[in-house]
Image: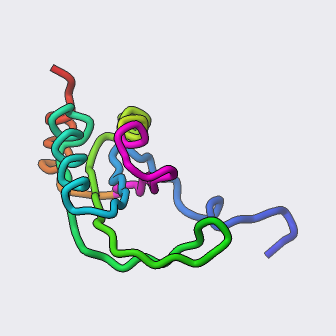
Amino acid sequence: MSGQGSTAASVAPSISVHYVQVQTTTDSRAEAMELARAAVEARLAACAQVAGPIASTYWWEDGIERAEEWLLMLKLPAAGYQALADFLAQRHSYDEPEIVATPIVAGSDAYLSWIAEETRQV
């Protein structure tokens, strides 16, 4: 490679992101289920899935922590990310919750249309 500051991001094909999957973790199934219900009820996500328990290992306050957590995954239009992130940050019990979005780069037209329809504010 030439020394022109090439990065993986500049090599990847340009993909327009219209939908995302947002994930967060909680320390209880009850909290994950409540966040899922509230986000879908508010139409911030078309669908929410809770999986777990999962085993997490991470740095926190200068030490390695291990915890059993529950994974919450939400599907929504990319334009709605900030509203959902604000909602999760406000309602989450963690001081610094994981709130990350992964692009949905492909999906069936019917499913993606369903996401758009179910997150329309009424």
Which is more toward the observer, 100 or 71? 71
Quadrant containing the C terminus in the rendered view: top left
Name which residue lies at 20% across and 52% down: 48
The quadrant in which residue 59 appears is bottom right
Residue 64 left/right relative to 115: right
The quadrant in which residue 3 appears is bottom right
Queried whether the magenta region covers residue 104, the answer comes back as yes
Residue 33: image x %, image y %?
18, 53
Above or below, 99 relative to 63:
above
Residue 46: image x %, image y %?
18, 43
Residue 15: image x %, image y %?
46, 52
Please, which residue is most extreme toward the right here?
Answer: 3
Which is more toward the observer, 43 or 69? 69
Queried whether the magenta region covers residue 72, the answer comes back as no
Rendering colour mode: rainbow
Label count reads 0
Please, which residue is most extreme toward the top here?
Answer: 122
Which is more toward the observer, 34 or 48? 34
Above or below, 121 relative to 59:
above
The quadrant in which residue 119 appears is top left
Residue 16 left/right relative to 23: right
Above or below, 108 relative to 113:
below
Name which residue lies at 22% across and 68% down: 51
Residue 8: image x %, image y %?
64, 67
Quadrant containing the N terminus in the rendered view: bottom right
Q: Which residues lie in the magenta part?
A: 88-105
Name which residue lies at 20% across and 28% down: 120
Above or below, 63 relative to 41:
below
